[in-house]
Image: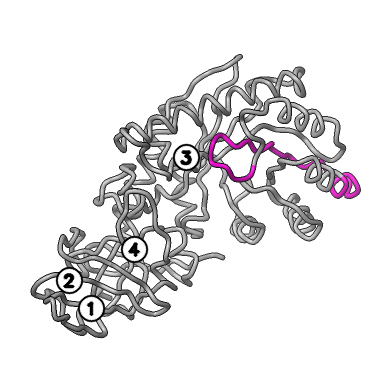
Amino acid sequence: MLIDDVHTPAVLVDRGRLDRNIKHMQSRATEQNVALRPHIKTHKSVDIAKRQVEQGADGLTVATVPEAEAFVAAGFDDIRLAYTVIGADKYERLLALMDHARISFCVDTLAGISQASDFFADAGRDVEVLIEVDVGHGRCGVPFGKPNEAVALARQVADAPGLDLCGVLTHAGQGYHGPKTGETRDDALKRTALEERERILEVAAAMFDAAAPDRDRQAFEVSIGSTPTMTHFQNGERDELTITEVRPGNYVFYDAIQVGLGACELDDCALTVLGRIVSKRREDSGTERAYIDAGKKVVTTDTGACTDGYGIALYNATYMREHPHVDITGLSEEHGWLKIPGAATFEVGDRVRLVPNHACVTVATQDELLVVDDDEVIERWPVAT
């Protein structure tokens, strides 16, 4: 099948770019002497996860219990939920997976530790947990500036039956905030990568000395994860502890936000949305308005620092070059709104290809990914969850 024969809207994955991105990130991890545990919430694809493991990935990261179930069922045997898991219903489902795979997840409160401990101790099983640390994103995790709180949690986990403290984990989501005043994009990524490394190592050292002094320091896991910060990640050491693993996810595809942040070039983007012009109108100003059959249910309404509109429009359905005169200015549920100054280059019925702002959310709405090589569809990969 050719791209011109595909039913729209559809999500396309360029196989050559995908494989290049996977190999490049694996090389970055190997150079820095860290394990690569890719986050599959970006692609939700067993086929892509297999390619990552074949290149050297050590286990997988997931965000949800259903993702963990889907990938254990597919044969993957080392799954980390980079999420604070709460609730006996979720613990029950993870317990069922522990006969088939190594399972670990995050805790970041005394209440969460107590609930997990009660369940797994009653079940007669020990489960590995990591204490989540907030290194500046402002979401879940013990704030990096409160080491006493982190130490108290570490001691609580160390004393809790049913729990095994295997390390600490963070996500430097502030890498998506873009440059501060006076910074370049590159400066911002370097700063955030340094913050992530230094802050998590400081907390890890304090926690280890307080709660796990008899353990092997080399076996204590220090896990970080963010595609933007991997651009400038350099491993480091504090009190004989180093970063042991990285968990980027978006890098397999990249997207318009990553291009805007400077984490990649447009030529690195492997995922695109294919739509079709269903209507167009000329305004009194001479500006053309065109509407495609790919709206917020496919493209998503996410926006980010250093981006304009809702993605990057490409010249046509085949050539991966940015169209400099077309802006994606709005989205409704089933429509994408295009602004085309001057003479229109698209006609009703023409196909349009665009790079969405946030690839992860785009994939989450789909049943399958169409794998392409130039203008040919060569495979169909199901979305697992």
Secondary structure beneath label 4: loop
* Residue type pointed to by label 1: Ala
Residue at the disc numbered 3: 56
Question: Quick one: label 4 or label 3, which is nearer the N terminus?
Answer: 3
Q: How far, Cα to Cα, is label 1 from label 2?
A: 7 Å
Magenta part of the chain: 118-140
* Residue type pointed to by label 2: Ile
Q: How far, Cα to Cα, is label 2 from label 4?
A: 15 Å
The picture places residue 15, in percent across and down from the top left corner, at 32, 57
**For residue 327, side relative to residue 23 (left or right):** left
Q: Which mark is residue 340?
A: 2
Name the outermost residue toward the right: 122
**For residue 69, side relative to residue 332 (left or right):** right
Question: Quick one: label 4 or label 1, which is nearer the N terminus?
Answer: 1
Residue at the disc numbered 4: 310
24 versus 71 height, above or below: above
Q: How far, Cα to Cα, is label 3 from label 2?
A: 45 Å
